């Protein structure tokens, strides 16, 4: 599974720790940065990561800003992207089972490393339930089509 990971300046520290954690557990990571120390506008990074997921160049994306919220708002503009913030492992598990969430947004300012790793591990290992949830996701895809997002 290829996972694209990006952050803004507020999420940089957690991103770096998360990438090390993912690589240690044998996952393929595409690091979307940022590399420098300066401030970064979260829409730029969210667009880059979400585009990779939208084009299926990455199977999953993880985006970290201060709250996870700005990243989420941007990522959902890209077709086929289902992004949301998860703040605990229960919401992470349900986001996979019900929503087939393919972009996880995390709050670098509000979350410690251990909780973040636990959420990510749960999110990566929980499958989509399909069934009635697939029908609902199809309605979301139809909405994108109707609005020209394809
Ligand atoms: C940047 O200061 C901050 O607004 C950003 O990291 C994020 O929390 C936005 O949603």
Image (cartoon, grey):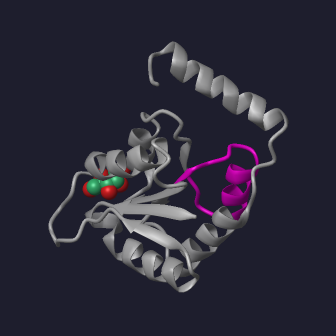
Check if residue 98 falls in the magenta segment.
Answer: yes
Q: Position of residue 64 (x, y in %)?
A: 41, 61
Left or right: residue 121 compared with residue 60:
right
Q: Is residue 132 above or below residue 10?
A: above
Name the residue at the bottom extreme. Answer: 24
**Residue at point 17%, 72% (across, down):** 37
Name the residue at the right extreme. Answer: 131
For ligand 1, give the image quadrant: bottom left
* Most foreground residue, 13 or 66: 13
Q: Is residue 113 visible?
A: no
**Residue at point 36%, 61% (across, down):** 6
Q: Position of residue 100 (x, y in %)?
A: 67, 46
Q: Position of residue 148 (x, y in %)?
A: 44, 17
Q: Position of residue 107 (x, y in %)?
A: 45, 62
Name the residue at the top extreme. Answer: 146
Q: Is residue 5 visible?
A: yes
**Residue at point 68%, 27% (across, down):** 138
Q: Is residue 21 above or below residue 5?
A: below
Check if residue 28 falls in the magenta segment.
Answer: no
**Residue at point 62%, 27% (across, down):** 140
Q: Which of the 4 image quadrants contains residue 10?
A: bottom left
Q: How many marks?
A: 0
| The magenta segment | 85-104
Q: Which of the 4 image quadrants contains residue 142?
A: top right
**Quadrant where the N terminus is found in the figure:** bottom right
């Amino acid at each position: 599974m290829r996972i694209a990971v990006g952050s803004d300046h507020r999420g940089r520290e957690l991103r770096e720790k998360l990438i090390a954690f993912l690589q240690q557990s044998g996952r393929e990571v595409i690091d979307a940065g940022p590399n420098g120390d300066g401030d970064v506008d979260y829409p730029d990074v969210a667009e880059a990561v979400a585009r990779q997921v939208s084009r299926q160049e990455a199977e999953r994306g993880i985006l970290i800003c201060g709250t996870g919220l700005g990243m989420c708002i941007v990522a959902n503009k890209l077709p086929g992207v289902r992004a949301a913030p998860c703040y605990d492992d229960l919401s992470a598990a349900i986001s996979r089972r019900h929503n087939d969430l393919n972009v996880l947004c995390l709050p670098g300012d509000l979350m410690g490393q251990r909780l973040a790793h636990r959420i990510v591990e749960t999110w990566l290992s929980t499958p989509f339930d399909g069934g009635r949830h697939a029908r609902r996701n199809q309605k979301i895809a139809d909405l994108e089509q109707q609005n020209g997002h394809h």
